[in-house]
Image (tube, rainbow, N blue to C red):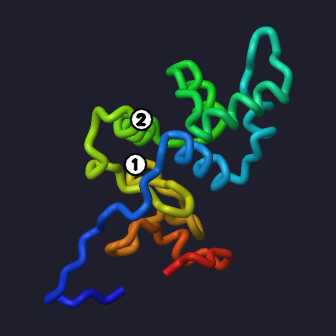
Amino acid sequence: MIMSHDAPKSWTPMVLFTPGSYLKTRRTAQLLTLQDVAARIPTIPRDAEHDLIAWLERIEADLVPASITTIDALHSAYRFDRSVLAALAAIARGERDPIHTPRICRICACTWRQPCTYDRQACAWVEGQDLCTACETAPANSEAA
């Protein structure tokens, strides 16, 4: 994207993620279903799969907050940036100004600290957008600008 020196364009957040929507987007970007994640979470005694799935659905819908133990369990099941999750939780609780929302790709929810890859290369940011280069160039991405 060529930018004119006369009109520099800086990034501004276009999508405000909640903690639950961030976790859901990271999970789906890694092609994992709720059943996949439920199968990867060890519980003692073993909880029924449908109970684990219902619990995960409530977390992703922001109906229940994720405890540190839950975050650890989810992090062992799939990749996400714990610092981004903490920042989004602080924003949701009103402890942090939404203007300080971390930069998150609107498609895959990757971040600068945890980039995704496309053709074995770490992604970068599309200038002026909340979109990573992997999602911009992905053939199946109909939302890429």
> Does 24 sit left or right of 44 as displayed?
left
User: In terms of sequence position, does the residue under pointer 1 or pointer 2 come before the other?
Assistant: 2
The type of residue carrying mark 1 is: Arg
> Does 110 sit left or right of 55 as displayed?
left
Q: Position of residue 105 (x, y in %)?
A: 47, 61
Identify which residue is drawn at 72% across, 53% down.
31
> Does 109 sit left or right of 9 as displayed?
right
Per the image, the residue denoted by label 1 is 113
Q: With respect to residue 142, does 69 lie above or below? A: above
Classify residue 5 by image quadrant: bottom left
> Does 109 sit left or right of 2 as displayed?
right
Per the image, the residue denoted by label 2 is 89
| Secondary structure category for the residue under label 1 | loop
The numbered dot on residue 35 is none
Q: Nearer the viewer, mark 1 or mark 2?
A: 2
Classify residue 138 by image quadrant: bottom right
Q: Quadrant of the N terminus?
A: bottom left
Identify which residue is drawn at 55% across, 63% down.
107
Distance from the alpha carbon under mark 1 to that under mark 2: 18 Å
| Secondary structure category for the residue under label 2 | helix
Most extreme residue toward the left, as rendered?
6
Identify which residue is drawn at 29% across, 32% down.
95
Q: Position of residue 141 (x, y in %)?
A: 62, 75
Crowd tier of the residue under label 1, counting other residues whose Cα lies within 10 Å: few below 14, some 14–19, many 20 or above:
few
Q: How many labels sit on residues?
A: 2
Q: With respect to residue 85, does 31 lie above or below? A: below
The type of residue carrying mark 2 is: Ala
